[in-house]
Image (spheres, helix red, strand yellow):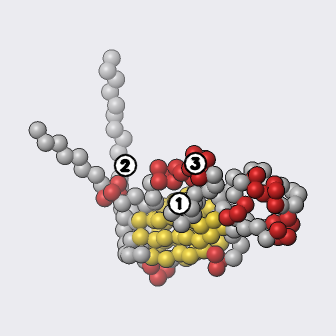
């Protein structure tokens, strides 16, 4: 007997990439194996997002702490329903790093940093530094021309209008009587 499971189009095209694809950013196993951070080109950071539906648009907030200049963020469409947000978060240099000329690549471990950087020595580096990327796939065709983006207080706020948004139909409410089993 054949069984068919149907899924809504929304389930096949989730709005954001799956959280399991982001699991590596919270794990230190890869860092322990490579004695450093994963290659940002193949394993970019996936910043956390909040998405709200306001009937005629989606409001998306992307956490990008440390970015002050909008030139460090790129927002673009790749197709009719797919939006990409990418950029790079850089660490501000410490006094010792500026003198020693250290970069993020050669300052991956506290051991190397302790021998080449003047005090204060970086012992823990948990912040998500480097390239980031998030992909949003919408179940509708958004209005590309009226998308707006604003960077404020470490949040990139996107308003993605729905192309043919209309007010939802009002439905008459009717109370349903629930009977007791006793």
Front residue of this view, candidates 137 and 116: 116
Front: mark 1 or 2: 1
Question: Is residue 29 among the parts visible in the rendering?
Answer: yes
Number of numbered markers = 3
Image coordinates of residue 120 in percent, x first then y, are 87, 56
Image coordinates of residue 36 in percent, x first then y, are 64, 55
Front: mark 1 or 3: 3
Q: Residues within 10 Å of mark 1 (few under 14, many from 20)?
A: some
Q: CA distance from mark 3 to mark 2?
A: 59 Å
- Residue receiving disc 3: 33
Residue occupying the point 42% across, 75% down: 78
Task: Please say if the residues under marks 1 and 3 sit with CB atoms less than 8 Å apart.
Answer: no
- Residue receiving disc 1: 43
Front: mark 3 or 2: 3
Residue occupying the point 62% across, 61% down: 63
- Residue receiving disc 2: 173
Q: Which of the 4 image quarters holds residue 149?
A: bottom right
């Amino acid at each position: 007997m054949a069984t068919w499971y149907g899924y809504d189009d929304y389930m096949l095209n989730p709005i954001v990439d799956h959280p399991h694809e982001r699991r590596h950013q919270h794990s230190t196993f890869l860092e322990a194996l490579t004695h450093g951070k994963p290659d940002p080109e193949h394993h970019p950071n996936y910043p956390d997002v909040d998405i709200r539906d306001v009937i005629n648009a989606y409001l998306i907030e992307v956490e990008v702490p440390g970015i002050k200049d909008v030139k460090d963020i790129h927002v673009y469409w790749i197709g009719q329903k797919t939006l990409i947000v990418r950029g790079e978060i850089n660490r501000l240099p410490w006094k010792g790093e500026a003198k020693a000329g250290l970069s993020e690549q050669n300052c991956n471990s506290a051991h190397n940093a302790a021998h080449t950087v003047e005090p204060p020595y970086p012992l823990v580096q948990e912040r998500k530094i480097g390239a980031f990327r998030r992909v949003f796939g919408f179940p509708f065709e958004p209005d590309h021309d009226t998308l707006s983006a604003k960077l404020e207080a470490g949040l990139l706020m996107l308003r993605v209008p729905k192309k043919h948004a209309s007010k939802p139909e009002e439905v008459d409410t009717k109370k349903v009587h629930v009977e007791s089993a006793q």
